[in-house]
Amino acid sequence: MSYLKKANEALRKKDYHVAIDLYDEVIKNSPALKTVVEFNRQYAKSKLKFNGASDSFLKSLPATSKQEVKNKELIYSAKGHPAAPYLMNYQVYTVDLVIPVYNAFEDVKLCLESVEKNTDGFRVTTYIINDASEEETSSYLKEFCKGKNDFILIEHESNQMYTRTVNDGLRASTADYVVTLNSDTIVSKGWLQALVRCILSDKKIGIVGPLSNAASWQNVPVLLDKNDQFAVNDVPNGMSVDEMAEYVNRISRHFYPRVPFVNGFCFMIAREVIDAVGYLDEGTFPTGYGEENDYCLRAADAGFDLAIADDSYVFHAKSKSFGHEKRKEYSKRGSQSLKAKHGKDKVNNLAGKIRDMKVFDDIREGVQKGLTKSKDQKQFKEPLSQRILFLLPVSGGGGGVHSIVQETMGMRRLGVKVKIAVPQKHLHKFLKVYEDIAEREDLFLGFDEKDLVNISRKFDVIIGTIYTSMKQVQKIKKENNKISTAYYIQDYEPLFSEPGTAAWQEAFDSYTLVPGTILFAKTDWICNKVFDLHGVVVNKVAPSIDHDVYKPKPGCFNTDTIKISAMIRPKTPRRGADRTMRLLKKLHDELGGKVEINIFGCEDSDPLFGKLERNYKYKSSGILTRNGVANVLKSSDIFIDLSDYQAFGRTALEAMSCGATSVVTAYGGVYEYIRNKENGAVVDVFNEEATYLTVKELIEDNDLYSLKIKSLETASNFSINKASMTLLLSLSSKEKS
């Protein structure tokens, strides 16, 4: 028997010491299996340490943001992990900073303090290369780095000059992305997240840089000073660097312009570029003037694009390491060396290209325009008087549709005029699904494509609800400019399609398609995911449960036989139907009469369902209306959702509202309502053995009563009235653009 099989067997037998030792042997003999066994290993360690439910167990699960798992350690993942698409960039990618230092103590101090504070959640290692600075600076660097594993000090006994100093840091770095950063900079909150967002926006991009107060063509808000030299701008209007950065991000249109050169003061390089191009040319450009332009040309020749992240801002003080005259001398010498190496005509032509790029004028104009207005200037719309139209161009139900229906009904109870526009050909389906709503014929409004613009003229706000609706919103706004636009984001929908396909591109573009649109969503995960990948702010609104439909029934605490339910949707692979059916079979086979199993969500005749594990006793309730789902959940003690991820996971919360305990995926927005081992269970769905052990423990520990009580208590906090009001308030005020 292999070490891995022996380890898993020991874990099943709760022989945790043996399991840990065996998993260590697996890693020692087969390092490639580390990511496979690490979850089980950590689980075994947590059981030894806490003898039951533990914070350590939850810490072993990847969280999606610091906010979602309060007071828990933020967990990171390898790029190849199957959950990586559902995590934030900062949980997946690593970043190294390379900071060359030569004196300029005050600048260095401000730089390092800002770097330490503003990692944006990334795993950052900072390499500080002290190029034989004087005592004051050298002593400070030693003291600053003492005891900090994420700051590594490399010291030169004699001055090696800039380029060799930077190369020492580049050679030491191992991260996915490396930033060479001048020691006279102050980085801001969000700077790194925006740079990574830019570099990931196109596979061709290999080098990026931010906007700045003093970075030649990357200057904002002013390009040139009164002497027609590149300006060294002050941070305007008494703003702090962080405030200026937040402002730049907020007004950014995410052009990410492609450029021939990126200013070297803050210079992010993808690992693939270093692998292809190598390091800076320290022989030709020893003093550091011209070396980054040379590197840009070499990277471009190797097939990489260069871009400016126009949503990132880094302050540049212009170093005092060299005097002005020496800097001019080095700059002239570097320019001559660059032209000698690459050809005068090529360098001049590319310099002319960046000089003539109108996009930078547009970026500066946008910054200047906004800075002339008061930051707090707002227009306010009385929330209850707005006439609102939700645009829902789909054929039927689903969790997102239920949210919209119940929250529009909540708004109507507040006296708001609100309707849901659905395709005329599907209107009868909505009337049937929501036949329990007395005013459904007034709520749902059937439309044909040609009628939408005229229909919209009767409303003040139109709200898109799915990525395909945003092109319709765009068309309506073009024809009816008076209407306000919003987007109720139900999920991160690019995940539904293969990257690069037309559907993926349409979904990806939907968040920025209609300028001035208010975006809102019901979970931190959705808000964070859209901001992480698109740089646009999404307002958080409260989720809701229809407690008239989803409520417990008498006797729901009788747990002599544990009743387990699960939704099986094999047509949607990310919902994990295959692993769910395997789990249910294992529970049935090993626990026998202790459990009863009820599944719903597909018909027995579905050929995809026929391919799943079905060789055990279960009840199949088929495809249900929401009242049918509620009846199943009311009869459940445990509801299981092993989806790859859930943007929210409405059914799990509905199960809790019916008195069941939910077992949910660790990935996505479930942390809005689930607290592991407090009111449910959070599992790594990609580790089926650990998931089984968690559910088995839930059944055998006889603690379901308290979990079910906590589930009901949690679910009671999610009201339609609260959700409706937060949605209305998100539409009522907006900063003027």
Image (cartoon, rainbow, N blue to C red):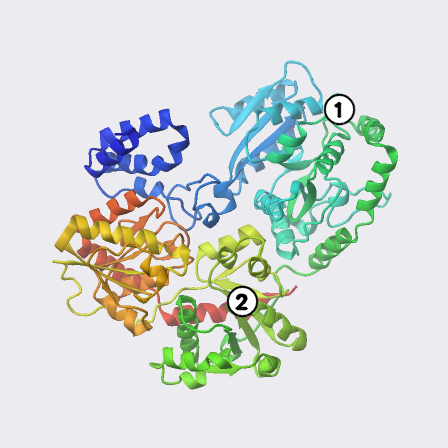
Residue at the (74%, 27%) spot, across then down: 288
Q: Which mark is residue 572?
A: none
Figure label count: 2
Asked if residue 340 can be seen in this view, the reply is: yes
The reply, left or right, for residue 590 in relation to residue 413 is: left
Say which residue label 1 marks: 287
Element assignment for label 1: loop
Compared with 444, 617 (above or below) is above
Q: Amino acid at mark 2?
A: Tyr
In the rendered image, the residue lying farthest to the top is 157
Mark 2, Cα crowd under 10 Å, few <14 / some 14-19 / many 20+, is many
Q: Position of residue 142 (x, y in %)?
A: 55, 21
The reply, left or right, for residue 712 in relation to residue 468 is: left
Q: Amino acid at mark 1?
A: Thr
Q: Nearer the viewer, residue 121 or 694?
A: 694
Say which residue label 2 marks: 487
Q: Nearer the viewer, residue 452 or 623?
A: 623
Q: Position of residue 7 (x, y in %)?
A: 26, 32
Residue at the (28%, 43%) spot, across then down: 689
**Sooner in the amino-acid sequence: mark 2 or mark 1:** 1
Element assignment for label 2: strand
